[in-house]
Amino acid sequence: VEFDVMLTVATTRALRSLQFGRVPATAVHAHLRFTHELYDVQATLLGLTTSTNAAKLLDEAEPPFLHYQLLKSALARLRATSIDTAMRTIRLRGTLREGLRDAAIPTVRRTLMALGDLSAAASASPHTISTPPPIIVNISAFRLHAFTRNSDHEADLISMDVVVGQAFDHKTPVFSGVLRYLVFSPFWDVPPSIARTEILPRVRRDPSYLTREDFEIVSGSGALLGTSDAAVTDVAAGRARIRQRPGPQNALGGVKFVFPNAFSVYLHDTPAQSVFLRARRDASHGCIRLAEPLRLARFLLRDQPAWDSLRINDAAHRTTPVQVDLSRPVPVHIVYATAVARENGDVEFYVDIYGHDRTLAKLLARGFRAYR
């Protein structure tokens, strides 16, 4: 009886871990909330007692994503490689060139094959996504992927570089939202914290700063207050706000993509294109800057024929904003994945810029008892 109870508990934990993860998402990312589909652990547990293919039932509890399976296979491959002590240290007598011989070559070959670098491209059965095709931003990879259909095959993605929040004090949060509309030629409403710590000190040193940078001060109702000392005082007191007019200096560039959330985070264009030349691109105040914003706009408006490339380009260079609602809301997931397995067999590793992996590793080491 004791063994049966222990086996039941262990299997239940395994099923819940495969379906939801061993550590609650909120333990690492406090604001991350998922709407889980109903999953009957008890029914699956009973099914395991009579099934002739238990592995199939366990597989069905896992996330139905191709890249999840690819990463799972890569992890198994890397774990097997780590067991082989001969592959941990490879000593070559010098630089290898075609035609040269070296005693370490067999180990090099075995290591490359174990890592998948000498094997055929990884294959996996196709899986589908039950939600509408989403947009995924991987913070640690500084990349955005927009899905063209319900599949996470790379052929069904459009991808581009992004800039995310600074690791020191402006981290981009991990969360999910729903993209509902675009704003071309937007105003930039300066967040109070940025106005207080960055804009106002510059205004005090240089009264012409607001005018030169196309900023204006408005009341809570949206009435223009000018840039007088009295208006600046109202900003400092919280009675007014600063916004930047549409144009070439606007921090949001020609378009922003709005998915309402508690963090005031959105996707947007930027005039600071030089940042995309960096390998590490954590440089924003938390919002996500896009390398190809008009490409994403064309993609999202592809089912609205009136919004062709010419009209989109014109809208991004107006002097007044224009809002365009999407015909169909698009899920947006801001994620943090420091290891990504590719369909070609490569495994890409990214820097743990925010330290989330270190937190997760500590929580995993605590075991199940910490999360009853």
Image: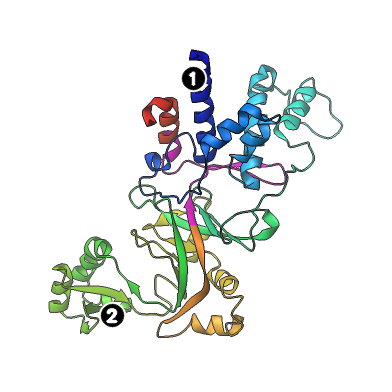
In the picture of the structure, the residue carrying the numbered disc 1 is 5
Amino acid at circle 1 = Val
Q: Position of residue 312 (x, y in %)?
A: 55, 81
Amino acid at circle 2 = Thr
Residue 6 left/right relative to 345: left
Q: Nearer the viewer, residue 12 or 282?
A: 12
Identity of the residue drawn at 78% across and 37% down: 119
Identity of the residue drawn at 78% across and 36% down: 118
Residue 198 left/right relative to 358: left
Classify residue 301 by image quadrant.
bottom right
Identity of the residue drawn at 16% across and 78% down: 231
Q: Using the numbered discs, state the Cα–Cα distance from disc 2 to disc 1 in whole angstroms.
A: 73 Å
Instruction: Single out the residue that lies furthest toward the right.
Output: 99
Q: Secondary structure at mark 1?
A: helix
Q: Position of residue 368 (x, y in %)?
A: 43, 27
Identity of the residue drawn at 12% across and 78% down: 230
In the picture of the structure, the residue carrying the numbered disc 2 is 211
Magenta stretch encompasses residue 346 = yes
Q: Which residues, given as a range, are shown in magenta?
A: 333-358
